[in-house]
Image (cartoon, rainbow, N blue to C red):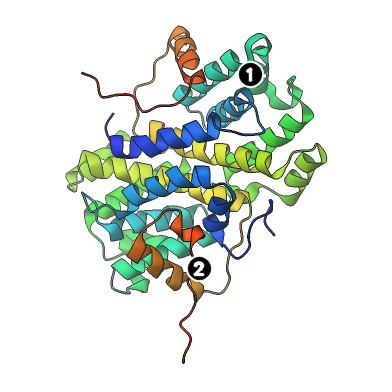
């Protein structure tokens, strides 16, 4: 049960955004810039960083939600997403993304864990200032989103078939207040 | 500012969380921000938000340093202690907040909005602290710099204009 009175038809961060739309607004804007832009890092790479950090923070709702969105961008390669979650060093991703995931993992522990060598290594693998900035801010932002969702014990669906449906909605329409103000995605009925 | 596109929603979030309508006073919300930043060992965020909180508490400004030194023995209300306890749990990880922590806050008459705002402030500073330290931003060391910063912050959070 959630720690405060939320609409349980709205899972995870959606129920929290509906509870306080004024704070939901800038969070939606932030998510759209950090996760939907194609300048520098690709959308799939951005969602993989979000998934990995949420997994490290043990936030079930967030790592499954963002994992499914990454999966869509990766043409359905769920195994790759799962490998990035748990053991990205052996995943079939670029050396650049691996070195950025190292930085994201350090940020998850605390900002000061990021070393000069971590940054140097990412640069040697072709990461730009913007790539490093966005990686750090995506990781930091998910340290917020994950704590918000779990800190208020927002409703976490256990029906795993519901995650791809919400992911499809995000992949098509992006983040923002529509994810709680419009009808929640539901399985298509056979007619 | 390196990335004004993300700067804008970050400032907007700080403004609505720390200055927007809330049953918690601005001084109390800045205190939660300073307390979480202190626990995250983020010198810049701790110093600046502690300064803003001191300024907003006015004559009661000693409360801020009492809380940063030893929250449980400080002079804040028991309700504020229960909320700071929740903020401290959120700083560690969302799941560390227990139904007992929430029940203790409710017993001291904390309502849903106060609990929500406490958790989101603590979560947001778990982001801001990591953003600042993760990119090793410049951190001033002179306390007078922070006192001035605190006064400015008390007026609100607006994205600075591009320097001419």
Residue A102 falls left or right of residue A23: left
Asked if B44 appears above or below A156 in the picture, the reply is above
What x and y, as percent, mark residue A124?
A: 18, 44
Query: Can the viewer see residue A118 in this picture?
Result: no
Categorize mark 2 by other alpha carbons within 10 Å: few (<14), some (14-19), many (20+): some
What's the distance in space between the residues labelled 2 and 1, CA to CA? 44 Å
User: Which label lies toward us, 2 or 1?
Assistant: 2
- Element carrying mark 2: loop
Residue at (29%, 61%) from the top-left corner? A44
Q: Quadrant of the N terminus of chain B?
A: top left
Mark 2, residue position: A184
Residue at (55%, 47%) from the top-left corner? A147
What x and y, as percent, mark residue B18?
A: 54, 30
Of all chains, the one bearing label 2 is: A
Residue at (45%, 23%) from the top-left corner? B44
**Residue at the extreme right of the image, as rendered:** B107
Do callouts 2 and 1 point to residues on the same chain?
no
Asked if A67 appears above or below B69 in the picture, the reply is below
- Element carrying mark 1: helix
Quadrant position of residue B63: top right
Asked if disc 2 and disc 1 are in contact, CB closer than 8 Å, the reply is no
Q: Quadrant of the C terminus of chain B?
A: top left
Categorize mark 1 by other alpha carbons within 10 Å: few (<14), some (14-19), many (20+): many
Of all chains, the one bearing label 1 is: B
Mark 1, residue position: B64
């Amino acid at each position: 049960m959630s720690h405060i009175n939320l609409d349980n038809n709205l899972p995870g961060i959606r129920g929290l955004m509906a509870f306080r739309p004024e704070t939901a607004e800038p969070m939606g804007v932030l998510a759209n810039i950090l996760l939907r832009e194609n300048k520098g890092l690709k959308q799939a790479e951005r969602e993989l960083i979000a998934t990995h950090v949420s997994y490290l923070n043990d936030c079930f709702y967030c790592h499954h939600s963002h994992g499914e969105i990454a999966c869509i961008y990766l043409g359905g390669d769920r195994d790759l997403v799962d490998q990035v979650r748990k053991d990205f060093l052996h995943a079939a991703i670029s050396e650049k993304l691996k070195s950025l995931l190292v930085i994201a993992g350090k940020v998850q522990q605390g900002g000061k864990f990021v070393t000069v060598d971590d940054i140097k290594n990412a640069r040697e693998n072709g990461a730009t200032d913007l790539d490093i900035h966005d990686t750090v801010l995506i990781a930091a932002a998910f340290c917020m989103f994950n704590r918000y969702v779990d800190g208020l014990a927002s409703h976490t669906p256990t029906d795993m078939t519901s995650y791809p449906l919400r992911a499809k909605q995000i992949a098509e329409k992006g983040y923002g207040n529509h994810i709680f103000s419009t009808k929640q995605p539901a399985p298509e009925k056979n007619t | 500012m390196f990335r004004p596109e993300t700067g804008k929603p970050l400032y907007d979030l700080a403004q609505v969380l720390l200055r927007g309508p809330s049953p918690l006073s601005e001084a109390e919300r800045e205190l939660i921000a300073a307390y979480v930043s202190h626990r995250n060992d983020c010198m810049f965020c701790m110093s600046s938000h502690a300064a803003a909180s001191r300024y907003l508490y006015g004559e009661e400004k000693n409360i801020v340093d009492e809380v940063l030194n030893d929250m449980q023995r400080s002079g804040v209300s028991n309700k504020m202690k229960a909320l700071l306890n929740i903020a401290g749990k959120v700083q560690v990880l969302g799941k560390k907040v227990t139904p007992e922590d929430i029940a203790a806050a409710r017993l001291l008459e904390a309502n849903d909005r106060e609990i929500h705002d406490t958790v989101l402030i603590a979560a947001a500073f778990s982001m801001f602290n990591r953003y600042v330290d993760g990119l090793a931003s410049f951190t001033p060391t002179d306390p007078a710099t922070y006192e001035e910063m605190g006064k400015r912050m008390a007026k609100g959070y607006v994205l600075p204009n591009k320097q001419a």
